[in-house]
Image (cartoon, helix red, strand yellow):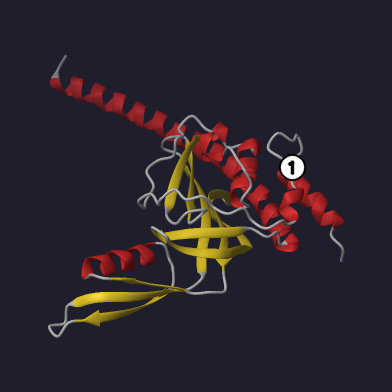
Amino acid sequence: MSLLDDLKNQAEVLRKRQQSGSALHDHYFREIHERLKLVYQHMNELAKSLNTIRPEVIRYFYIDGSTVLEGLRQADYQVSARRKTIDHADYFEALLVRTRCVGTEKLRFAKESEPLVTRMREFLWGNSLKFDLRESRSERGYVQSGTFTVEPEVPVSITVSGVPERGHILIVTRNLENLGEVTYTYEIDEVDIPLLEELTRLLIGKPNQFRRMGKHQQPMRPAQRARPVTETPEPEPSVIDDLPADDSPKSILGSLRSLLRRRPD
């Protein structure tokens, strides 16, 4: 076999491999679209129900050790989608669920050295918290200490997106229960109603199995360092207490619909 023939054979093998990879990518892209469509329908209906019922979900966020933003109420749920148009058809690429936790009292605390002030400033910025910083400087202009005043508001989000190259769906939670970002990886067929039920429970502060579901869990590396493990006080009784326990056959979204029908005008 001549060198030219050998190169032609190698090129043909590579071409077939690329075609196969492209076909697999397109297959996963369409499967991901169908799953994201299911997620969008579920979360959009959930957001509408929660915005009407307004259940009381109380959150506590540890900033540093015993420094905590407490008594924040979670509300204002929104769902949006990013789509891609191919051959005049729209396909889901990613979904975003947003909410926010808001309190009434600002949090004030101090850090006593420039490295600690810098680290805390970057931590607050990194988690999209609004704050004011008053620095105390030496005669030479070096930071000696800093007093932080943090606004009692924490933005929360859940992003669901596909990775067609790998046939995966990613769910990324940000500031949900704890400050920071955590990424969960799922096979396409693992993103189903049972998983969304557990994600719903996680979102509204109910006991759940979300972190144990899917063969890729435990979750991937959190973006922020782990916060100290601290017992979180139970939320005050609310409409959420009427929702089913984990072993109930009734879906949590179905229960919200029932509560919505029973809600007086």
- Relative to the observer, which residue lies in front, 51 or 163? 51
Q: Is residue 38 left or right of residue 256?
A: left
- Relative to the observer, which residue lies in front, 8 or 56? 56
Residue 25: image x %, image y %? 45, 36
Up-down: is 232 above or below 131?
above
Residue 229: image x %, image y %? 44, 48
Q: Is residue 81 left or right of residue 112?
A: right
Up-down: is 135 above or below 260?
below
Q: Residues within 10 Å of mark 1 (few under 14, many from 20)?
A: some
User: Residue flagged by tag 1: what amino acid is it?
Assistant: Pro
> Does residue 30 appear in the picture of this structure?
no
Q: Is residue 5 left or right of residue 44?
A: left
Kindly indicate the quadrant of the structure image that contains residue 44.
bottom right
User: What residue is at 28 percent from the left and 69 percent from the top?
Assistant: 117
Q: Quadrant of the C terminus?
A: bottom right
Instruction: Name the element at disc 1.
Output: loop
Q: Quadrant of the N terminus?
A: top left
Residue 213: image x %, image y %? 54, 34
Kindly indicate the quadrant of the structure image that contains residue 163.
top left
Kindly indicate the quadrant of the structure image that contains residue 125.
bottom left
Residue 72: image x %, image y %? 57, 65
Judging by the rendered image, the residue that carries numbered circle 1 is 244
User: What residue is at 36 percent from the left and 26 percent from the top?
Assistant: 16
> Does residue 97 appear in the picture of this structure?
yes
Total numbered circles? 1
- Relative to the observer, which residue lies in front, 166 or 61? 61
Q: Among all residues in the image, which is located at the extreme bottom?
A: 139
